[in-house]
Image: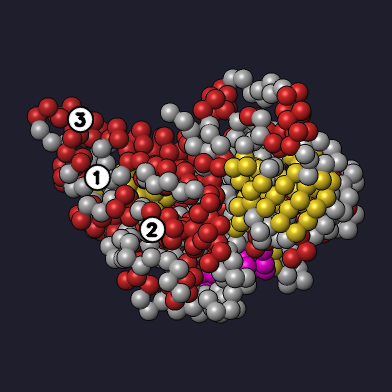
Amino acid sequence: MRSDRVKRGADRAPHRSLLNALGLTAEEMDRPIIGIVSSYNEIVPGHMNIDKIVDAVKAGVRMAGGTPLVFPAIAVCDGIAMGHIGMKYSLCTRELVADSVEAVATAHQFDGLVMVPNCDKNVPGMLMAAARLNIPTIFVSGGPMLAGRMKDGKRTCLSHMFEAVGSYTAGTLDEEGLLEYENKACPTCGSCSGMYTANSMNCLTEAVGLALRGNGTIPAVMSDRLKLAKHTGMQIMELVKKDIRPLDILTEKTFLNALAVDMALGCSTNSMLHLPAIAHEAGVELSLDLANSISEKTPNLCHLAPAGGTYMEDLDRAGGVYAVMAELAKKELISLDGMTVSGKTVGENLAGVENLDPELIRPIENPYSATGGIAVLKGNLAPDGCVVKRSAVAPEMMVHSGPARVFNSEEEAITAITGGKIAAGDVVVIRYEGPKGGPGMREMLNPTAVIAGMGLDKEVALITDGRFSGATRGASIGHVSPEAAVGGPIALVEEGDTIHIDINNYKISLDVPDEELERRRAAWQPPAPNVTTGYLARYASMVTSASTGAVLKI
């Protein structure tokens, strides 16, 4: 066993003495030692129940003959961090999670790991660590939140809450209505109830084969979530016994499967940051260009919030991620021969799986659209690409041209939007919010939600080198690369320049002659760094482009 390095032989007597200090018996030391990575905390709603999930995992490990030992991982609630300096720290926690899991797991030589994440950067951070460590590993999340319900019976969620602020600002919602959203949007613990980033990534843990069925969709408050956790604890012992490791599972075909499932589900645009970063750790190159080639042949089968009026609990009742994968398998849009943590192949996992609600998960022959939920656009404004959640864009905004309204920070843009200075047809440009420029690549849910809440989401586009929450809808185009802080073309846009967007043809362009762009480039000066001390400064000095997953250079 891997753990023999800290518990076998006379020279390890000091190590055993420290294990004795934990209260471990000789019998417990003799068993495989399983590290359980718990992201439990009392500030993130998606994590407040994880102590119960961890207890269930521990029970499963013990039932199967292992010794479970828990250690922590951090997590940030993007909703609470939104709209202030805290959001600069969200994306960069992904690397902190990956590094800290690597450090603790290697220092203590666990035989296997059970990762218990739930929220936006916490899940991909653990996935990156799993690939990097390559010891038997399995995932079980804290589970999604239930949707809220208003007094008129309408169901609601966090994205509605943010948009309600825009409606209140526009004078179309009164204070009482705003308070009702505030009290009803987030009714239970769990990751927020739509197909936002946390739920996207938890669903994709199933798609890549590192979690058991239901991990992405069983609600946090359901007893089935505890049963899943117990089965996950039991299954890690099988993975240790058979020496099935993450890199046996995370092959190139696996990541192509994940992209196909991403397109079918209509996942968050943040998946286009996280999947390349996870693939990087697995030694697989996952170019953004692949996203469009897969999108072209993969239909969009689901319209969960914010794209539609259904939620994670509904997807679970319809058959979950496996039902979506079964639909894709009918047209051979996913590979079926890859290994998974169940000990079976993808194809074996999908045997007998049914789509229990063809209205929620559209059959493959009757999709919402023939192409996938995410599109990567390129052009002279974004030579290395930018990303839009196509499934959440109104048809009338799929092609749009308008004058640029240029802002050098999120705060500047929000002031203009709420001040009534943005008109129908405008293209809002928010720059210097990229991985280096932010630093930290803030999510822009506040400005997009205010635009939607003011009824302008079908008339105004927003472009940024920052990123968007999975809760964002409308023609919101993020991850513009190269970013402004390194002199990307978005830094050269001036007020009133015409920007052309053609989502279905994957194009975005700035209607300015090349010679004029070169004149502007010669005059451009990089701005002074926003942050010069602490972790953010260190992150800014090491982070790479959003087009390559915003991973850190070594």
Closest to the observer, 75 or 550:
550
Bounds of the magenta segment = 303-317
Q: Nearer the viewer, mark 3 or mark 2?
A: 2
Q: Is residue 264 above or below residue 38?
A: below
Q: Nearer the viewer, mark 2 or mark 1?
A: 2
> Gap in Å between the C-alphas at discs 3 and 2?
41 Å
Residue at screen point 56% across, 69% down: 299
Mark 3 or 2 closer to N-term?
A: 3
Residue tagged 2:
253
Q: Which residue is mark 1?
A: 111
Circle 2 Cα neighbour tier, 10 Å, few/some/many (<14 / 14–19 / ≥20)? some
Residue located at (53% from left, 49% from top): 288
Q: Residue furthest front?
A: 515
- Residue 516 to residue 456: above or below: above
CA distance for labels 3 and 1 = 16 Å
Element type where label 3 sits in the image: helix
Asked whether the viewer can see residue 85, the reply is: no
Q: Is residue 548 above or below residue 144?
A: above
Q: Is residue 304 magenta?
A: yes
Residue 215 % position (x, y): 44, 61
Of callouts 2 and 1, which one flags the residue occurring earlier in the amino acid sequence? 1
Query: What colour scheme does the image use?
Result: secondary structure
For disc 3, the marked residue is 15
Looking at the image, can residue 235 be seen?
yes
Residue 1 lies, in percent from the top left, at 17, 44
Circles 3 and 2, Cβ within 8 Å, touching? The answer is no
